[in-house]
Amino acid sequence: MELKQLGEHTWYIPGRVNIGYYEENGKGYLIDTGLDDDHGKKILKLLNETRGTPLRAIVNTHSNADHIGGNAVIQKRTNCEVWATRIEGIMTEWTSLEPLWLWSAWPFREIRGKFIEAKPSKVTFIDGEKAEREKAESEYPIMDTALTAVPLPGHYLDMIGVKTPDGVFFAADALFAPAVLEKYRFCVMINIEAGYKTLDMLENSRTTTWFVPCHAPAVRDIGELARQNREALAWVSEAVYDTLAPGRALSREDILAEICLAANLEMDAASLLLNLSSVSAHLTYLSARNRVEPFVKDCRLLWKRKDG
Ligand SMILES: [Zn+2]
């Protein structure tokens, strides 16, 4: 693990989940904390050895377990605050909502591992008491710091990117490395249309010297990565549509199974439910474009082409 400098006051720790670090007025700020206690302890050790600056807050981009899993141990040891948007913050304080949401009922043990359900931590909302919708469309300052929150809709509920004043843009899970896209095919994306818009916005972001996605290496130019992510989204949309050949009707579980068997993708219960959520998002996207439609037959929710 190492701390790499990207700007005068900004660093990051490269890894399976890239962690951001920023300093202002003698205080340190982490951007996300990785998967678990172990990851959190390693981050703290590294910061103590290399910087030794008191940690004021963790800024969480969103509430997925691989981004908030180190919060609890870091908060316990440093007494730092955890800052997040309202809805992501609620998911961070009550982390059993994540498997509950996936399963749509109280979750069973096999989907409550640390990759889905992190240890909870105590959150301070960065979007305050004002209606967050008002702010959701545009950038806003993070508390009293020079950091800026940039809404990145698509991947999750109210995910933000974090911009530092020295030109670094932590882009969270708005885009993934080609190797990740290739390996998993279905990267979590709950709103496809919003996800495309976010990719456009990132590509047009001009005041950035470094982009740091959480699951891709830091890059100076985001264009190629945005293009690869657009392609990956389109691939899933078309794969879903292709399973619904004219005259066929399938449930979303059937659609997922057909795609995964053809692409040789193995899943456990948790990854199957995550992928099912992506299939659902693509079905919503395709139905909004009048390409597919749902209907109930023999007590099953099925999908078919609208033109077939
Ligand atoms: Zn992630």
Image (cartoon, rainbow, N blue to C red):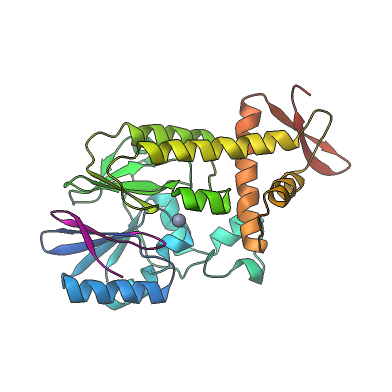
User: Observer-nearest residue: 73 or 89?
Assistant: 73
Task: Say left or right for 222 vs 95.
Answer: left
Q: Quadrant of ligand 1?
A: bottom left
Which residue: 35% across, 72% down? 40
Q: Which residues are magenta?
A: 1-18
Which is nearer the eye, 269 or 184? 184
The residue drawn where x is 77% and y is 43% is 251
Residue at 20 percent across and 75 percent down: it is: 48
Relative horizontal placement of residue 265, taking residue 230 as reference (left or right):
right
Residue 13 visible? The answer is yes
- Indicate whether 180 appears above or below 111: above
Does the magenta segment cover residue 7?
yes
Task: Tell me which residue sits at (52%, 48%) in the image.
Answer: 181
Quadrant containing the C terminus is: top right
Relative to 129, say whether 291 is above or below: above
Depth order, front residue of 130/123: 123
- Find residue 245 and report its image quarter: top right
**Residue 61: where, in percent of width, then height?**
37, 53
As drawn, the residue found furthest toward the right would be 298
Provide residue 289's location: percent of width, then percent of height.
Answer: 62, 25
Picture mark count: 0
